[in-house]
């Protein structure tokens, strides 16, 4: 059991678990916790995706009964008596799709699942700094997810005020139907928020304190740098979500009026706790958290992309230092741009001017990163295997999503496109096109190390092709809808004359979205089958140089038999001292000819 | 991968391909900005186009480089990747050039933002209208001849509003219950209405929207053209009917409303009123008075999708007549006097 050498505190590792419960349920092992997050998030991805398919059905075929599900579940959840989606049900779908995807899919996937698995391995440590806290983080997240799921089943259904939950709609009694559902969502966000804060703290301390000898800050893989910066975001911003969620909950159940101004009247009744509140207070505090949250949704993906692009181009990342500075700049600027969600909110226009300036300039570090990814490819020897295809799509979709953001940063243009499908197109390009594709890249890339098996390559290629195609077919036309003025969150657009010519596009988008959804079955099948019965993988199928590829599959509980001593950077592919091959592991001895890779 | 999987994937492609073909064949779906009709709209569109040109150039350059690299630098046996860590010079240029472009966008945007948000029109000739949104309707209040809000001669209407052509209009915005958003798409006007807060947006319409009965399309007339033409101001209703061509994959009757065709039809027994220059005339109408639609652009509850209003633009004399013709409504008066005036009398200041 004690095959590893224990020389100092950092060498300590928790003993190997012997029973099923300690192995798979209440585990301190970061690799197991990572997989717990991975599986749970994938299940929520299926749920969130299904909600989106129902949304798209209603948009394309307003008030038509939903096939199969509509007849099975008519009169329940968001279905009316005839199996079509009710207006209130539509808002539930839109709200829960957003909440689930942001808090229960993307953040847990890219931060908690892959961050947990990779950080200790990348820095040459045996586990994170606080393994017990790590387990607690997961076991806060899962109940939060179950609470969200349960909110569909309560009277009046799940929250329906948008994932942004603006008061007074989300606050005042009688404004929005779901009462218990909304309260459950707020409790769930507390739990998930604490999970996130503790996780971020854990990662910060781990990266600062547990790096192996020789693993200087400038030899960290960019995945780790991205996780580090993301952890700073998490720790600083998430408490604001807890605070503002608490204020909303108190308004709802304790009679306070943080957000309810004097004289607020729903239908003809003065709201009981009306007095002195200010709706924009929610927006300021919420977006102070939620804007950094969207950078939490992208920064780890940028890290994955950098490492994968480098490994499959067989050359170093172009401008490593600039990449790190860009990550830090995005973090710094990310805290002072929140008002761009509020250009039209009634906020003082002078503040709008200030936020416009910071928002336009946050495009700069992201642009630098895109150029550096292109520079990484330039002159490379590019191997177009599935992780690389996904990573290339990440770059390509991130370019589209990032450029569309410039339109809304220019606040006079935002006057027109705010709260239209233009915004929906923008964030789906960055969250799905960029981040989710990077999740596919990370999954196919690190699958051999996580599960000791390979995913089927042909299925991966097919999944990539179909997803790339249908994703663009589904979401690019949304830019057109936004340009034409199509508002968001409309249960049906048939009431407006100016929107009617756009109906064919809505139908086209829906059908593309259905095809997109069905294409994901390929990934699901590939993933699940390969976990249990995939071909056993070699230790380093990608010939990559970072530390996780130096240890056997599956990774033993203690990670490294001897803690590695790092001698080189993480992306030193094709450097002259790697000849005759083109790579060496990061802990290669100083005399390279003894163990050059092939 | 089996042939079956490949065929299944191909079948998936058919769905959207057919839908696209259908959409294009069934009448060109509008994918561009609707024609702007107001003063600020022109400037906003110009800024949009500026940004679009810049973005298009960057898009083509970066995606082009990406595609080129994938092809030109793909792995070939015997070829080794070039080993370099970057170039400070290239980095600086690639940071400086976008920075200058972003600076340009910031400066032009700031100037326009100043005009549309920080400098409301002032003077006696400006028309002030209060907008009070609620779940789920638009309420409007005009100050009346005494040019003061909250007095006995205020005119209150709901859903359908009117403004005079060629005058600066300032909308004073607030909400009775939740946050709504006052959106006039062709006019590029949008602003949230927040309870407890007074917002202001302003615009000016120099053209009058009417519906051409011959082409069944909306056209915009100058005041002189309007006065010279025969316009029906009542007796016609806007009808819609599904496009007669059946789509084979439409699931139900409700889906047919996806392809509506609008046209004005003469009401059977309504009194037809045709005016020319504000005076009744016997000529057959060329046009019917039309409007701009008002939409709600902020989620406000279950009937958010049904919160439509209309904004007519009228010649000054017709506007005055319209104001005088509005009947007092006690439920509207309750809302305005009982809530807006009672809790926020400071909102009635016309500055």
Image: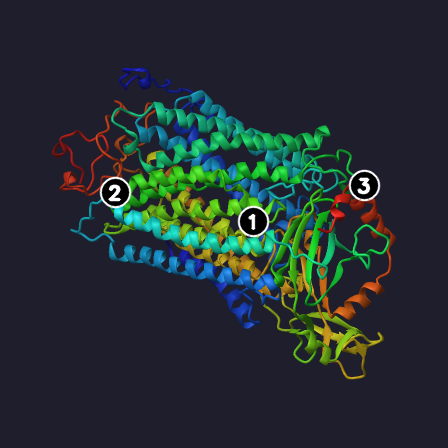
Front-most of A433 and B150? B150
Q: Do the residues under discs 1 and 2 have CB atoms within 8 angstroms? A: no
3D distance between C-alphas at marks 1 and 3? 35 Å
Is the N terminus of chain A in the top left, top right, bottom left or bottom right quadrant? top left
User: Same chain for the residues at labels 1 and 3, yes or no?
Assistant: yes
Q: Position of residue A577 (x, y in %)?
A: 15, 38
Secondary element at image label 3: strand
- Which residue is painted at 58% across and 36% down in the image? A285
Q: Position of residue A158 (x, y in %)?
A: 65, 40
Front tag of 2 and 3: 3
What crowding class fits label 2: few (fewer than 14 Cα within 10 Å), some (14-19), or many (20 or more)? many
Q: Do the residues under discs 1 and 3 have CB atoms within 8 angstroms? A: no
- A218 w.r.t. B297: above or below: above
First-in-chain label (2 vs 3): 3
Q: Position of residue A134 (x, y in %)?
A: 45, 25
- A397 w.r.t. A270: above or below: below
Dot 3 corresponds to which residue? A269
Dot 1 corresponds to which residue? A52
- A331 w.r.t. B78: above or below: above
Chain letter of disc 1 in the image: A
Query: Is residue A493 visible in the rendered structure shown here?
Result: no
- Which residue is painted at 29% across and 15% down in the image? A8
Front tag of 1 and 3: 3
- Which residue is painted at 70% across and 78% down in the image? B213
Dot 2 corresponds to which residue? A316
């Amino acid at each position: 059991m004690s095959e590893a050498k224990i020389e100092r505190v950092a060498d300590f590792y928790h003993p190997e678990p012997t029973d099923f419960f300690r192995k798979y349920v209440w585990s301190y092992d970061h690799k197991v916790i990572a997989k717990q997050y991975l599986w749970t998030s994938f299940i929520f991805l299926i749920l969130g995706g299904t909600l989106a398919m129902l949304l798209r059905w209603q948009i394309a075929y307003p008030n038509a009964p939903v096939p199969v599900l509509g007849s099975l579940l008519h009169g329940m959840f968001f279905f009316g008596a005839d199996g079509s989606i009710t207006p209130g049900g539509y808002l539930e779908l839109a709200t829960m799709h957003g909440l689930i995807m942001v808090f229960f899919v993307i953040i847990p996937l890219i931060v908690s699942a892959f961050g947990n698995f990779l950080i200790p391995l990348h820095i040459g440590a045996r586990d994170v700094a606080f393994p017990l806290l790590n387990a607690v983080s997961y076991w806060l997240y899962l109940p939060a997810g179950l609470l969200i799921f349960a909110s569909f089943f309560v009277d009046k259904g799940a929250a329906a005020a948008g994932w942004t939950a603006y008061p007074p709609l989300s606050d005042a009694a009688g404004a929005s139907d779901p009462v218990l559902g909304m309260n459950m969502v707020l409790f769930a966000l507390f739990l998930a928020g604490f999970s996130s804060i503790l996780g971020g703290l854990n990662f910060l301390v781990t990266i600062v304190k547990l790096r192996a000898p020789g693993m200087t800050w400038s030899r960290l893989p960019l995945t780790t740098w991205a996780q580090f910066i993301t952890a700073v975001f998490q720790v600083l911003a998430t408490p604001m979500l807890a605070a503002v969620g608490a204020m909303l909950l108190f308004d709802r159940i304790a009679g306070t009026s943080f957000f309810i101004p004097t004289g607020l009247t729903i239908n003809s009744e003065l709201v009981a706790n009306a007095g002195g509140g200010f709706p924009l207070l929610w927006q300021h505090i919420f977006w102070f958290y939620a804007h950094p949250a969207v950078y939490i949704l992208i920064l780890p993906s940028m890290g994955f992309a950098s490492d994968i692009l480098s490994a499959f181009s067989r050359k170093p990342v172009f401008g490593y230092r600039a990449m790190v500075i860009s990550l830090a700049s995005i973090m710094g600027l990310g805290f002072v741009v929140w008002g761009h969600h509020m250009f039209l909110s009634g906020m003082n226009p002078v503040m709008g001017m200030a936020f416009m300036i910071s928002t336009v300039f946050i495009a700069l570090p992201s642009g630098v990163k895109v150029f550096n990814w292109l520079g990484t490819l330039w002159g490379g020897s590019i191997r177009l295997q599935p992780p690389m295809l996904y990573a290339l799509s990440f770059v390509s979709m991130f370019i589209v999503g990032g450029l569309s953001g410039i339109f809304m940063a220019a606040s006079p243009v935002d006057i027109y496109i705010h709260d239209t499908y233009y915004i929906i197109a923008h964030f789906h390009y960055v969250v799905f096109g960029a981040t989710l594709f990077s999740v596919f890249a990370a999954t196919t890339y690190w699958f051999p190390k996580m599960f000791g098996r390979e995913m089927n390559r042909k299925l991966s290629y097919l999944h990539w092709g179909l997803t790339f195609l249908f994703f663009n077919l589904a979401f690019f036309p949304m830019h057109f809808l936004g340009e034409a003025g199509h508002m968001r969150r409309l249960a049906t657009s048939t009431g407006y004359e100016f929107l009617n010519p756009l109906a064919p596009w809505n139908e086209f988008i829906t059908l593309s979205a259905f095809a997109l959804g069905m294409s994901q079955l390929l990934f699901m099948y590939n993933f699940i089958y390969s976990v249990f019965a995939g071909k056993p993988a070699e230790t380093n199928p990608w010939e990559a140089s970072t530390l996780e590829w130096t240890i056997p599959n599956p990774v033993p509980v203690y990670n490294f038999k001897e803690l590695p001593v790092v001698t080189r950077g993480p992306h030193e592919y094709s450097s002259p001292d790697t000849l005759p091959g083109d790579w060496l592991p990061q802990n290669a001895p100083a005399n390279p000819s003894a163990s050059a890779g092939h | 991968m089996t042939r079956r999987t490949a065929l299944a994937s191909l079948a998936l492609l058919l769905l959207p391909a057919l839908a696209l073909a259908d959409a294009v064949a069934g009448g060109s779906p509008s994918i561009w900005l609707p024609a702007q009709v107001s003063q600020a709209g022109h400037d906003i569109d110009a800024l949009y186009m500026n940004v679009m040109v810049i973005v298009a150039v960057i898009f083509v350059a970066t995606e082009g480089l990406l595609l080129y690299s994938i092809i030109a630098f793909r792995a070939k046996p015997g070829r080794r990747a070039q080993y370099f860590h970057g170039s400070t010079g290239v980095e600086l240029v690639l940071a400086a050039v976008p920075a200058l472009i972003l600076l340009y966008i910031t400066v032009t945007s700031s100037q326009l933002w100043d005009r549309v948000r920080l400098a409301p029109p002032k003077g006696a000739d400006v028309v002030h209208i209060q907008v009070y949104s609620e779940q789920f309707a638009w309420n409007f209040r005009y100050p009346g001849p005494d040019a003061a809000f909250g007095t006995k001669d205020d005119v209150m209407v709901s859903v359908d509003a009117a403004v005079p052509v060629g005058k600066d209009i300032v909308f004073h915005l607030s909400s009775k219950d939740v946050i709504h958003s006052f959106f006039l798409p062709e006019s590029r006007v949008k602003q949230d209405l927040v309870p407890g807060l007074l917002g202001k947006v302003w615009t000016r319409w120099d053209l009058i929207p009417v519906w051409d009965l011959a082409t069944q399309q909306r056209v915009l007339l100058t005041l002189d053209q309007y006065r010279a033409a025969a316009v029906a101001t009542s007796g016609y209703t806007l009808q819609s009917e599904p496009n007669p061509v059946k789509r084979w994959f439409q699931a139900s009757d409700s889906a047919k409303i996806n392809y509506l065709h609008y046209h004005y039809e003469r009401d059977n027994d309504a009194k037809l009123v045709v005016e020319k220059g504000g005076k009744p005339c016997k000529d057959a109408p060329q046009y019917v008075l039309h409007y701009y639609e008002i939409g709600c652009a902020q989620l406000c509850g279950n009937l958010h999708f049904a919160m439509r209003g209309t904004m007519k633009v009228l010649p000054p004399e017709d506007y005055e007549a319209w104001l005088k013709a509005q009947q007092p409504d006690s439920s509207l008066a309750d809302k305005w006097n009982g809530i807006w005036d009672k809790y926020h009398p400071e909102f009635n200041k016309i500055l």
